[in-house]
Image (cartoon, rainbow, N blue to C red):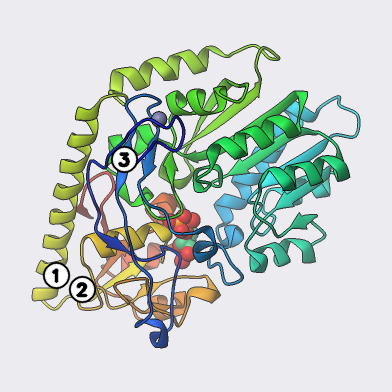
Amino acid sequence: MLCRVCQSEISQFMSFGDMPIANGFLTDDRFESEYFFELAPSFCNRCNMFQLIEQPEPERMFHENYAFFSSISRYMQIHFKAFADFVMERVLDGRNDPFVLELGSNDGIMLRNFKDAGVRHLGIEPSSNVANVARSQGIQTLSEFFNLDLAERVLREHGQADAVLAANVMCHIPDINTIAAGIARLLKSDGILMFEDPYLGDMIEKTSYDQIYDEHVFIFSATSVTWSFGQHGLELIDVIPQITHGGSMRYVLAPEGSHPVSQNVNDLLEKEQAQGLHRKETYDQFRRNCEASRDALRSVLELLQNSSKRVVGYGATSKSTTITNYCELGPEHIEFISDTTPIKQGKYTPGMHIPVKPYEVFSRNYPEYALLFAWNHAQEIFEKEEGFKKQGGKWITYVPKVEILE
Ligand code: TYD
Ligand code: ZN
């Protein structure tokens, strides 16, 4: 297998086994025909990109029934308002009739803020159900996959962009070279590309291997972003850590030489060297950490199962698909998973087929233990769920380590 960025030979350093589509919540009549692929990550010694060996075709993941609606979390709405404000202040301020393009704009959670400020904008969102939500709110959105043809069309119809944005999207797109070339073509000579995604350094540090699932074909670092976008004349000029998705990084890029490079970039590149993100041994250790985490989580749940405790999952996240399948946790361990997303409710989780139920089913009859699959929203959830704790309910978490919280 060749690296998706630099075409060097790469090989997998571990396998999570057969995996279904992470957001493929399904009804029981679909169990027979469920699609599986081997989830196996790899790491390139040359350009340092962490990537999946195999990724299902995009149409299997992003379609008219896509189950992920960004606006479901109150905190994420605040986060994307702050992201938009940051772009307006740092990039758009003082520019004449600027144009903002967002890749993977989902239900318009970020672009809404540009629309409200009267800024020319366009979202590209291939999953038509979430895109329709955005359009119904007056947010300009195209339901297509981004490619070079589309880049040309956007250029003809809207002109070059002052800012190209993406959040939790860049890491989804396997053909990173086409994307980077398309963005380089679309950006004004003083334009800015800003994207944020789960950060490799955090994942390695916390053993949060549930970031690895079909959609995340890449887990980026400053080192691999510098390499991959540098090939297309885009220079990393700043990096800003984010707490979202359990540890993300916002990468700020610009046409080479057009903007000064912040000291933050060099600092982070050095930190990544010190952490060993370029070394094979780091990934061998990560594999052992994943195996230990899996064994510990299984033991806890088997113990609770043997003592007939009620355990419910909290948040039917994409990430939980990797956990439940890799750790082989099914309805015998987890009675159901509570989730506030209507399209997931009444369905079953991919692969292990744990029922997903509305939040009210959880809150009406608290279980003894809740396994926090939406651990990246822990703060928001703990604040909301004081009642559960007061009734003696206990949280189980697995990041950064498996434990029952007292
Ligand atoms: P998210 O954290 O975005 O994870 P992923 O990217 O792995 O899918 O998804 C959060 C899920 O948790 C989403 O399905 C909504 C659900 N959720 C709740 O049910 N209750 C809550 O209070 C929160 C914050 C999320
Ligand atoms: Zn490479």
Give residue 54's position: percent from left, percent from top: 37, 52
Mark 3 lies on residue: 42
Residue type at numbered disc 1: Leu
> Which residue does the image show at 28% across and 75% down from the upper left?
367
Task: From the viewer's side, name the closer residue of 70 and 15.
Answer: 15
- Which image quarter is the N terminus in? top left
Quadrant of residue 68 in the image?
bottom right
* Residue 90 visible at all: no
Mark 1 or mark 2: whose residue is earlier in sequence: 1
* Residue at screen point 44% across, 15% down: 267
Q: Decide: marks 1, 2 in contact (CB < 8 A)?
A: yes
CA–CA distance in space, label 1 to label 2: 8 Å
Q: Residue at x 39, y 62 (%)?
A: 386
User: In the image, is residue 272 above or below residue 353?
Assistant: above
Residue at 68 percent across and 35 percent down: it is 183
| Residue 6 left/right relative to 148 | left
Alpha carbon separation for disc pair 2 and 3: 31 Å
Q: Where does residue 341 sit, x and y in percent of width and height? A: 52, 70
- The residue that disc 2 covers is 333
Label placed on residue 281: none
The secondary structure type at the circle numbered 3 is strand
Amino acid under label 2? Answer: His
Element assignment for label 2: loop
The residue labelled by disc 1 is: 304
Residue extending furthest right?
A: 96
Q: Is residue 60 visible?
A: yes
Nearer to the camera, 370 or 25 = 25
**Label 1 secondary element:** helix
